[in-house]
Image (cartoon, rainbow, N blue to C red):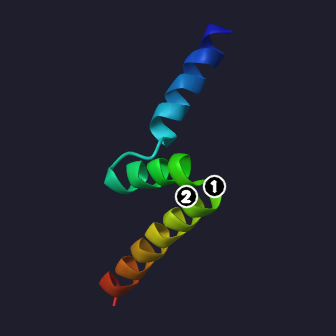
Amino acid sequence: MGFLLTGLVLGFSIAAPVGPIGVLCIRRTLAEGRAVGFSSGLGAATADAIYSLISNL
């Protein structure tokens, strides 16, 4: 049971979005709801995808 709890804690800490964009998405989700938070995250992911597409050209 101890290994399971340790694994869960480590997994959540690694998977947690770290950085200013992650904090912005979390803050907007808590303040304005799931739809706004989801659209913020989708916008950030789209911007990252466009930047990576441009860098690979």
Mark 1 element type: helix
Q: Note whether 33 is above or below 45 in the view shown.
A: above
Image point (42%, 52%), residue name? 22
Q: CA distance from mark 1 to mark 2?
A: 5 Å
**Viewer-proximal residue among 19 and 3:** 19
Instruction: Give the residue type that dot 1 points to.
Output: Arg
| Residue at image mark 1 | 34
Residue found at the very far top of the displayed protein: 2
Q: In the rendered image, which residue does mark 2 sit on?
A: 37
Q: Are marks 1 and 2 in contact (CB under 8 Å)?
A: yes
Task: Specify few, some or many for label 2: CA neighbours under 10 Å numbering under 14, 14-19, or 20 or more.
Answer: some
Q: Residue 29 or 14: which is nearer the viewer?
A: 29
Q: Position of residue 57 (x, y in %)?
A: 33, 91
Mark 2, secondary structure of its residue: helix
Q: Amino acid at mark 2?
A: Gly
Picture coordinates of residue 28 (x, y %)?
48, 54
Q: Please name the residue shown 61% across and 16% down the image.
A: 5
